[in-house]
Amino acid sequence: MQTTELQPDAEPCWITDSCLFQYHRCSRRAFLDRHGETSLRAPANDYLLKLRQDSAEHRQSVLHSYQPLSEPPSGDRLEQAAATYRLMEQGVDYISRGVLIFEIAPNLSLLSSPDLLIRQPGNAYFGEWHYLPADIKFGKKPKLEYQLIAAFHAYVLAEVQGRWPETSLLILRSSKVCEIDLPKQLPRMEELLQACIATLSQPQIPEVFISHSRCDLCHWFSYCHQEAKQQNHLSLIPGITPARYTHLQAANLTTLRDLSQAQPAQLASLPGFGEQVAEKLVHQAQAALMNKAIARLSPHSPYGFPLAPEDLPTTEIELYFDIEAAPDKNLVYLHGVLVVDRRRQSETFYALLAEDPDQEQAAWEQFKNLVQQYPEAPIYHFCPYEAQTVKRLAEEFGTPLAEIQPLLNRFVDVHKCFSEAVTLPIESYALKHIARWIGFDWRDAGANGAQSICWYDDWLTTGDRTYLEAILRYNEDDCRATYHIKEWLVNFAQTFWP
């Protein structure tokens, strides 16, 4: 397997909290951020820019409650570190954007910049006071990477002020404050730090590994994905996690051909595999090599195929349902329903839209009224989210269970049916990957769920209806993609049904 070699900088090495955070998520990203060719980085998309803006606004709203607030003047790293130290010597109550530097070896320094330094009683270098660090995060939970960086802040601060803080804080969304268990997290952080230093000091770029849940928003994604495609890297196989990849490497199964020729029983005993996962991974490798769909046969089915005709009913009228929501606002702003009427040979799309967040309940009522006009029609959707959201909205808006349960009984999850029955040569069983493989595409190339959220924010901000029109096109295409996938799956299954 070929790898790209990039020469490390000859300049002094800085390990910052941001660098360590990215290293915990992906060692390759940390290396590329330090040594990679900047022209290969993709610009931030609208959704990432929105996340950054939301995070910045949350940070400012939290800092507003910590007054009087001192901030070191702008300058280079050393100047800001000196200014931060002077503020600590003065004993100010709160310091924002402080810079803490600890040189751990010649030409190797740690740089910590916690969102807040909060004065506490207790002796340190400055006198009868010291500081504890706090980071402000837009997340709802104290994720492990947040805790490790909070421990890093405490580690560097202890050297700067000559005393360990009692804790390190995380201030989360809704101003929830979490104290970090430093005795537990410091050893983990130090292990992470040593690994980060070793990786950034070597000349060779870490091996590529594509994980869509973590990679899709990364500015190196296109660069890494292209390399993975050239290598036919196993991380492009759905279901191969970093942990499973490590076990496959230990078993000398490092190529698509190796994996395609393996016996599922050979893999089932590996940690984190089991019979079902092993069989799926071997099938995925075979489908990728042959570039064709493979049926997942079942000895327990009378058809030898996991799906029966009643699992995918073809009726005179069928509904295809897709929701658009803004999780940060806890808001469902669009219920899209495609009504396929085989008697009239018509396809009609209904957009039940909350043009304003206050109209969410009205859109919900419109959705209920529409689907109740077709009481026998199956309601096809993709993944469990639609069913889960309907349950939540029913509770939120007081819809009786006796009314909502018959509705939910009509729901059919196309994703579940598809993933149980067919293996495709694709990287993910997300809607777009499946639909594009079978020949369906979206009218707006850059449209996706995250972009829809940005468009809705833009509509609320500007009142420009072109943003609403883009949302409706995208949602209708999602409904139609679900329809095309269901039709394709029925045609595929019919070769097994009598």
Image: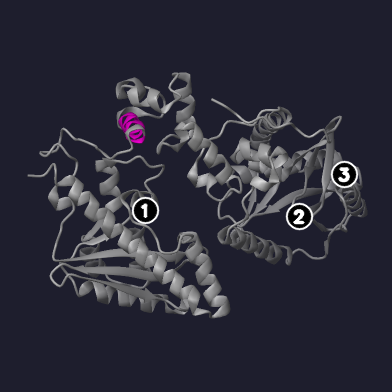
Place residue 106 in its image quadrant: top right
- Along the line of sight, the residue nearer the viewer: 366 or 474: 474
Amino acid carrying label 3: it is: Asn
> The N terminus appears in which quarter of the rendering?
top right
Residue 5, above or below 26: above
Q: Nearer the viewer, mark 1 or mark 3?
A: 1
> The C terminus appears in which quarter of the rendering?
top left
Q: Mark 3: give few (<14), some (14-19) or many (20+) Cα within 10 Å.
A: few
Q: Nearer the viewer, mark 2 or mark 3?
A: 2
Task: Kindly check if marks 1 and 3 are in contact, taking CB atoms under 8 A apart as contact.
Answer: no
Residue 392 visible in the shown view: no
Residue 348 visible in the shown view: yes
Q: Residue at x 45, y 29 (%)?
A: 244
**Disc sitting over residue 431 in the figure:** 1
Q: Earlier in the sequence, mark 2 or mark 3?
A: 2
Extent of the magenta region: 277-288
Name the residue that disc number 2 marks: 116
- Main secondary structure type of the part rendered in magenta: helix
Would you say 315 lies left or right of 169 here?
Answer: left
Image location (x, y in percent) of residue 226: 53, 40
Would you say 217 lies left or right of 291 here?
Answer: right
Name the residue that disc number 3 marks: 123
Q: Earlier in the sequence, mark 2 or mark 1?
A: 2
Amino acid carrying label 1: it is: Leu
Image location (x, y in percent) of residue 333: 43, 71
Image location (x, y in percent) of residue 139: 58, 55
Question: Element type at marker 3?
Answer: strand
- Along the line of sight, the residue nearer the viewer: 206 or 328: 206
